[in-house]
Amino acid sequence: QKEVEQNSGPLSVPEGAIASLNCTYSDRVSQSFFWYRQYSGKSPELIMSIYSNGDKEDGRFTAQLNKASQYVSLLIRDSQPSDSATYLCAVKLGYGGATNKLIFGTGTLLAVQP
Amino acid sequence: DGGITQSPKYLFRKEGQNVTLSCEQNLNHDAMYWYRQDPGQGLRLIYYSQIVNDFQKGDIAEGYSVSREKKESFPLTVTSAQKNPTAFYLCASSLEAGTNYGYTFGSGTRLTVV
């Protein structure tokens, strides 16, 4: 079982719609969760982080965390063609504070259609 | 402006040759990381370092070597023992281990074997 799983997509949504990106993780002790956006040929860019159950909003982005279900999601409201990218979910396992290693999913490709 | 600088942007390696990828950060981050990204495989950890003069192997360290003589610098050498080095290499840094901060990535080096 992969430690962090994402649907590879592509997820295609029309401009102005809500894009919903999902991620599950296998280790129950995971503490911190991150969403990165990666445009083709570019490096990942951190867009959201979440540590507690519930929702966290930042502009058009909302991250949702449910530790009981081991599930984290990213909602993008009013999707724009410029949001078209691969979205990487990353999880920090937090074993005894010994390491800050992030475990990445393989990413979901989002395509916003004009 | 603070950030991470990777160089070169593109690198070509001949068979049997060692090459070194540079990574420098001025964010005063303690931890630094090297990842390799191949199409459809996400980010895989090669090496990481939490403090100067100390580093740990990641999941795919064979054929690679690193050094951490200065806090700001974490160069990666791809040796001739790495049989399939063609990939996109990403360097990242973060605040000290045990925190909830995500990574900041450099712009990447694309290595091709010729």
Image: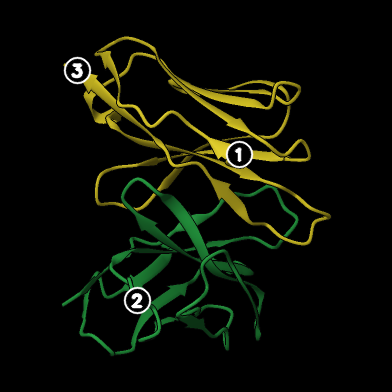
Which chain is represented by green in the image?
B
Distance, label 1 to label 3, CA atoms, is 33 Å
Q: Which mark is residue A113?
A: 3
In the picture, which quadrant includes the C terminus of chain B?
bottom left
Compared across the picture, whether A26 is left or right of B91 comes to: right
Compared across the picture, whether A65 is left or right of B3 comes to: right
The amino acid sitting under disc 3 is Gln
Residue at 60% across / 66% down in the picture?
B29
The amino acid sitting under disc 1 is Gln
Same-chain check, marks 1 and 2: no
Compared across the picture, whether A81 is left or right of A78 comes to: left
Q: Which residue is mark 1?
A: A1
How many marks the image carries: the answer is 3
Q: Which mark is residue B30?
A: none
Q: Decide which of A16, B42 is in the foreground and name it.
A: B42
The amino acid sitting under disc 2 is Lys
Residue at 57% across / 39% down in the picture?
A4
Across and down, in percent, residue A90 comes to 55, 42
What crowding class fits label 3: few (fewer than 14 Cα within 10 Å), some (14-19), or many (20 or more)?
some
Q: Chain of mark 1?
A: A
Which chain is represented by yellow in the image?
A
Distance, label 3 to label 2, CA atoms, is 40 Å
Q: Is residue B98 above or below residue B80?
A: above
